[in-house]
Image: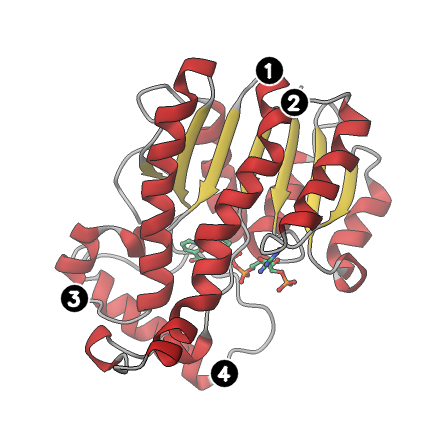
Amino acid sequence: MSSYAITGTSRGLGLEFVRQLSQSPNNTVFAIARNPDSATKLQDLASQRPNLHVIKADITDPQSLSSAAASISKITNGTLDVLINNAVSTNQAAAPVPPSQIPLDVTATTEFFRVAYESSLFGAIWTTNAFLPLIEAGKDKKIVHISTAMADQHLIKNTGISLTVDYAVAKGAMNVLVAKYAAELAPKGIKVVALSPGWVDTFEGPKPAEYEGFVEYLLNSFRKIWPDLKGQIVPEESVRMVLEVVDGLSEEQSGLMISHHGNEDWI
Ligand SMILES: NC(=O)c1ccc[n+]([C@@H]2O[C@H](COP(=O)([O-])OP(=O)(O)OC[C@H]3O[C@@H](n4cnc5c(N)ncnc54)[C@H](OP(=O)(O)O)[C@@H]3O)[C@@H](O)[C@H]2O)c1
C-alpha cells in the first residue's frame, strides 16, 4: 500500500503506469497531466477508480508543480511514497540532425536543445524539488526518473546512432543529475534512480511513413548489438517490468541508470 505520483500521464507509458498502479485499490495514485481536460483516456480511467486522482501540472512550469504538490499533500497529509517522473518533450525538427550539423549560431543552438532540456533536465529538477518534502515524509522514499538507453555511451558507440542529439544529451544530463541527487539524499534514506523502460511502441493512431522509417533505422542499428531483436515491446510489458524494478530498488542501484531488467541490459 503506497502513494505514487506520476508525471506525463495523458498517454503512452505514463498512462500505463497509472493504469497498472491504480489496479490495486490499496495504492493511492496521483496522475499528473499538463492538459487533463483533453486527456480523455485518463479521465475515463479516473471515473472508474476512486483511488486515482488527476492533477494538473506542467513539468516545465515550477509554479504548477508547487500547486500540484500542495494538492497532493492535502490528500496524503504531507507525504508521498514514490515519485515517477515520466514526462518528456523533444524538438521534432532536431531528431534527424547529427551533431556536426548544429549551426554556429547561439539562437539556433539554444532553440535546438531548448525543449528537451526544459523537460528532461529543468523539468526533472523542478519536479524533484517540488515533491521532495513529501517524499522525505513518505515511507518508501523513492524518486524515479524515466530515462533512456539512447543516453548510454556504450549503446551510442556500438550502434552508431548519431541522431536524436537533443533528446539523448538532455537525458544524459538527467542521468548525471540523478547521481547528484542520490549522493545528496542518501543520508536521508531517499533512493533516486534513472530507469530506461526498454524500446516501447507508444505511438497512438496510424503511423506515418516517416515514423515507420525511423523505427526501421533504430531496429537495424540496435541489431548491431542484439542481432535477434524482433522489435518494440508493448507498454503493458515495459511498465510491468519497470514497476518490479522500482519495487525492489536497492541502495546499490540508487544514483545509476538501470533498465527495465534492473541492470544494463537495455532491450
Ligand atoms: N517509448 C520508448 O521506446 C521509450 C524508450 C526510452 C525511454 N522512454 C521514456 O519513457 C517516457 C515516456 O515515453 P512515451 O513513449 O510514453 O512518451 P509519449 O507517448 O510521447 O508521452 C509523453 C507524455 O509526456 C507528457 N508531457 C510532455 N511534456 C510535458 C510537460 N511539459 N509537462 C507534463 N507532461 C508532459 C505528454 O503529455 P501531452 O499529451 O500533454 O503531450 C505525454 O503524456 C519518456 O521519459 C521517454 O523518454 C521511452
Q: Is residue 231 visible?
A: no
Q: Quadrant of the N terminus?
A: top right
Q: Residues within 10 Å of mark 2 (few under 14, many from 20)?
A: some
**Pointer 1 or 3: first along the chain:** 1
Image point 81% across, 28% down: which residue?
74
Q: Which residue in the structure is indicated by mark 1? A: 139
- Three-letter residue code for mark 4: Pro
Q: Measuring from the top left, give residue 98's x and y in whole percent.
A: 24, 76
- Asked where in the image residue 10 lies, by quadrant, the reply is bottom right
- Asked where in the image residue 168 lies, by quadrant, the reply is bottom left
Q: Which residue in the structure is indicated by mark 4? A: 208
Q: Which residue in the structure is indicated by mark 2? A: 2
- Three-letter residue code for mark 3: Gly
Give above or below for 230 relative to 7. Answer: below
Closer to us: mark 4 or mark 3?
3
Give above or below for 162 relative to 194. Answer: below
Q: Which residue in the structure is indicated by mark 3? A: 160
User: What SS does tag 3 mark?
Assistant: loop
Q: Residues within 10 Å of mark 4 (few under 14, many from 20)?
A: few
Closer to us: mark 1 or mark 3?
1
Tell me if label 1 and label 2 are in contact, CB under 8 Å: yes
